[in-house]
Amino acid sequence: MIEDIEMRELFRIESSEHLQRLDDDLLILENDPGNKEAADEVFREAHSLKGAARMLGLTEIEALAHRFEEIFAQVKNQNTRLLPPHIDQLYHCLEAIRMLVEEALTGVRCDVKVTDLLCRLEPEALGQPQVRPPQLKPTDTTVPPPPPESPVSLDESELIVMQAQANREQQRETGDSAETAAPFDFPSAQANIVPFQIDNIRVATSKLDLLISQIRELTAIKQRIVQRHLDLEDGFDKWHKLAGEIRKNASPTAKAQEKIESFTALLEKLKSRLYDDRSKLEFTTSELEESVRVTRLLPLSSLFRVFPRMVKELAREQSKEARLVVEGGDTTADKRVIEELKDPLMHLMRNALDHGLEPPEERMQLGKPPVGTITLRAYRSGSQLVVEVQDDGRGLDVEAIRRAAAKRKIHPPEVLATMTPEQLRSLIFESTLSTAPFVSDISGRGIGLEVVRVNVQRLKGEVEVESVPQQGCMVRLRLPETLAATKVLTLRASGLTYAIPAESILKTFPVHRSEIFTMEGRSSILFEGEAVSVARLGGLMHFARNDFSVPKQAQIDAPGEENVLLPAIACAVGEERFALIVDELLMDQEVLLKQQNPLLQQAGNILGATLLETGEICLIVSPSELLNSLCHQTIVPKKAQAEEAPKPKTILMAEDSLITRTQMKRILKGAGYQVITAVDGLDALDKLKAQPVDALVSDVQMPNIDGLTLTARVRQLKKYRELPIILVTSLASEEDRRKGADVGANAYLTKPTFDQKVLLDTLRRLV
């Protein structure tokens, strides 16, 4: 009997499906022996059943399924047909497998002689040709003692097959055959009748998604009914007051008084019944939501199993040694959460391998084991799912991050100078920021970690970074277990209704206009003794802008507001705090989040939408994206912006192929660069000396002077020692990349996988 309860239930489901399909296909083959599709499916189903049995150590089932597979492999390969007697034998075998499956599930022994079945199911016995390995006949009856070596271990299923072959040989020697042997000794059909019952079914996830959509509608209806009940209670209270006034002032007749009492009793009864119905509907809807939520939960192992091979291959490509340790694979999460996690985890592990783990020789010099360790860990923390990617490599260099952020002008130098190590570490998720000295197709462009931030924000999650120099780095993702139900605060801003997730709200409070001041170009207020940025939500949610200056609605400068109290919401994203000014605070409620429509993706700052109890569609804002928008806003006059319009950068491009040179020039000019072309490395050197440029893009294999030599010579020129150089070539090996880095190239991109977006992203980062 299978001891593991979970595995036993899984095998019950899977084996039932395989056996049913085998039964169906044998029936098809009985009526149509030449049906190739049915024969192919028998082969596949037998193979799958064999694999499942092997994983669980069910050797007898494995041996019988393997014999099925052998027979139908020969049917496929030799284009032969099974005759009715052969089908009968296969039916007997299928029934035996069913009995063995039942034994594995219940522990009740069955009397199935597997070796006899295997004898009868040999391809030769079924009329199929069989190729046997040559038999070595001993020349001496004396058996020498075995050598003092480890004995050869045979799989138990192989021993069963060998026993069947031995029995078959004995039958030949005695003149018996499978065709004349006694029939199978199965228990009577009456003794094996099992009540027909389907315990599990498989449901397409699209149907679950449809069910969730319908639950959303049901929840909206429930909320409207709740509102109607509240309206009725309000009306009932008004009727009570009116009836009291009638009794007091109008002195109604006894008959009128009776009617008033009767109508009041009717309303009371209606109110009570409606309350009961409302309570039952709320309970049933909540139970249904919870049932569907649990149904959509999957173990993270379904995602984690794809990463060991990826880590192994990437480590080999980079001449590093790494092992992946997976913990908490049995932790469950919503199907969509798992789907959205794949890309962030892939980029985090790629980043750990490329930037975190040192080469083996460097690790040994530091006293570390040559094999680096990446740990992928998942666990539950309250209502949150936590996934961590940790390495034992270099850790993050906060000063290098500060320099890279200053170069990319992510924040003003004075702001970067005051940032804490935690704040600086969070900058690694900014677009185009990378501390890598060398860029390749794999990493170094500052794009991968931005994907992590964007995907986690889309999941209403948070990213945390911990790092210790020379000990490693850990990125922690905090995510909701499910994306269905969300507690929100609804509010009004610029005439629209929005909702903000309750878990991001610290406090709601009124703000006096006089309390708002400007700090580092942004409106700010004091919250719990700390200066935090503040903006109008309506201004941040503008769906269209003609320029990149801060809209007036986002600046809190409307006239006449000096003595007005403005509703404010203090929010937190990780360790960062900020405040939003709104027009009106409405109410707390629990809503079902509908995934963001692609049409709104360009608008930004939106998590998704929901349907309120009033039937109104409400956009749910993303606190993390709002913080990002707010941090990138500074109050800059348009005139100053026009005066500071940057001059187009000049790119020198060296490429000997006319077609490639023309295409690359179009790409660069289309991105707003001025382009100077050179036909080879020698031509590029001449033009470099004649005219200043901001970057060099070069092929490697060129006449006169190749790209590697060109790069080395450019680095010898004092004026261009810091010039960004990007090599674009068809040479894609790790050794070629290393040569490019050795001569001083900043980036090495390969033509077989060339993507113009990669080139432009790299230029934006380097120039």
Image (cartoon, rainbow, N blue to C red):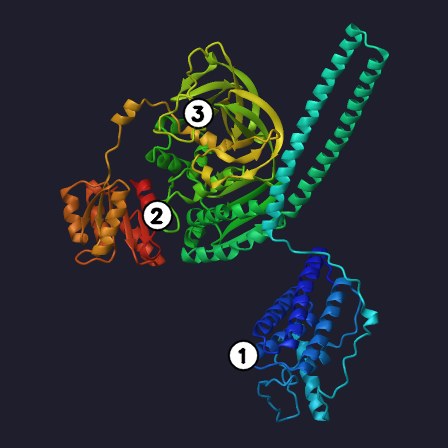
Query: Exactly how many numbered labels are in the figure?
Result: 3
Q: In the rendering, which numbered label is found on residue 481? A: none
Circle 1 residue: 77
Circle 3 residue: 539
Circle 2 residue: 758
Q: Is residue 11 above or below residue 495?
A: below
Residue 635 position within the rendered picture, expressed as x and y whole percent measured from the top left: 36, 22
Q: Disc 3 or 2, which lies upstream in sequence? A: 3
- Residue lying farthest to the top in this orientation: 249
Q: Label 1 to label 3, Cα distance in Å?
A: 70 Å
Q: Disc 1 or 2, which lies upstream in sequence? A: 1
Q: Label 1 to label 2, Cα distance in Å?
A: 48 Å
Q: Disc 1 or 3, which lies upstream in sequence? A: 1
Q: Give the class, few, some or many, for how many residues have Cα within 10 Å of label 1's Cα (few <14, many ≥20).
A: few
**Left or right placement of residue 112 versus residue 348 in this view:** right
Q: Is residue 468 visible?
A: no
Q: Is residue 48 visible?
A: yes
* Residue sitting nearer the eye, 306 or 421: 306
Residue 191 position within the rendered picture, expressed as x and y whole percent measured from the top left: 83, 70
Tag 1: amino acid: Asn
Tell me which residue sits at (15%, 44%) in the image. 689
* Residue sitting nearer the eye, 146 or 229: 229
Residue 83 position within the rendered picture, expressed as x and y whole percent measured from the top left: 65, 82
Q: Is residue 590 above or below residue 307?
A: above
- Residue lying farthest to the right in this orientation: 254
Query: In what quadrant of the picture does the N terminus appear?
Result: bottom right
Residue 569 position within the rendered picture, expressed as x and y whole percent measured from the top left: 53, 23
Tag 3: amino acid: Gly
Q: Secondary structure at mark 3?
A: helix
Q: Are marks 1 and 3 in contact (CB under 8 Å)?
A: no
Q: Are marks 1 and 2 in contact (CB under 8 Å)?
A: no
Tell me which residue sits at (32%, 52%) in the image. 749
